[in-house]
Amino acid sequence: MPSEIPFSIGDLAKATGTKVETIRWYERVGVLAAPERTSGNYRAYGAEHLERLSFVRRARDLGFSLDQVRDLLQLADDRNQPCDAVDRVAREHLEEVERKIADLEALRHELRDLIGQCRHGTVAECRIVQALSPQLGPAGTSQEA
């Protein structure tokens, strides 16, 4: 073990805002290297674990998938290569984010339309309930064949 003071899993969790079970899961799926163990069989994390987990957390907070995080980690581990591959992963993710934003904007428009159709009558006449109900069509008529 290096001369640094090791972190417990609780310390690592607190320092990165990550749940202990998530850290263990990252170890199981190979995103975070398993740490050495103390004589009492406790996990002993080093600064490299803190740095790597912080990277993973930030990437996940930005919405990168676990596979994308794996790709980014692999690329980050070889710092002498051109960053074209990192740029490609980031651009692909940006395209996904932009598609999701477009979907959310369409959803917002549809919800606004539904809410705008409210006549403040009874629930039986509610356009929102009608639109959400699978057996009723726009005018509250049955859609069954």
Image (cartoon, rainbow, N blue to C red):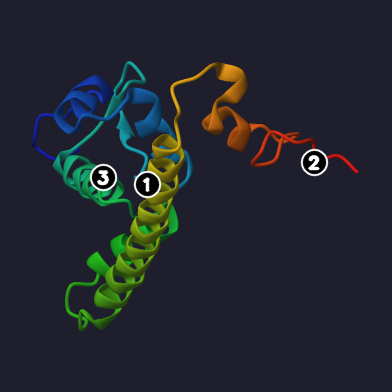
Residue 74 locus on image (x, y percent): 33, 65
The amino acid type, in three-letter code, at marker 2 is: Gln
Residue beneath disc 2: 143
Please name whichever residue, 106 or 91, is drawn nearer the observer in this view of the structure. Answer: 106
Q: Is residue 64 above or below residue 91?
A: above
Residue 58 position within the rendered picture, expressed as x and y whole percent measured from the top left: 21, 47
Report, in whole angstroms, how far the alpha carbon at label 1 lies from the one at label 2.
25 Å
**Toward the viewer: 40 or 10?**
10
Tell me: 97 left or right of 81: right
Q: CA distance from mark 3 to mark 2?
A: 42 Å
Which corner quadrant of the image does residue 86 belong to?
bottom left
| Amino acid at circle 3 | Asp
Which mark lies nearer to you, 3 or 2? 2
Q: Is residue 142 above or below residue 92?
A: above
Q: CA distance from mark 3 to mark 1?
A: 23 Å
Q: Residue at label 3?
A: 61
Classify 135 as above or below 83.
above
- Mark 1 is surrounded, within 10 Å at the Cα level, by few (under 14), some (14 to 19) or many (20 or more) other residues, namely few
Q: Earlier in the sequence, mark 3 or mark 2?
A: 3
Please tell me which residue is depicted at 27% across the width and 48% down the height of the picture.
Answer: 56
Residue 25 in the image: state x and y as whole percent. Answer: 44, 35
Q: Is residue 45 left or right of residue 139?
A: left
Rendered residue at 62%/32% (across/down): 130
Question: Mark 1 belongs to which amino acid?
Answer: Arg
Element at label 1: helix
User: In the rendered image, which residue does mark 1 sit on?
Assistant: 108
Q: Quadrant of residue 84?
A: bottom left
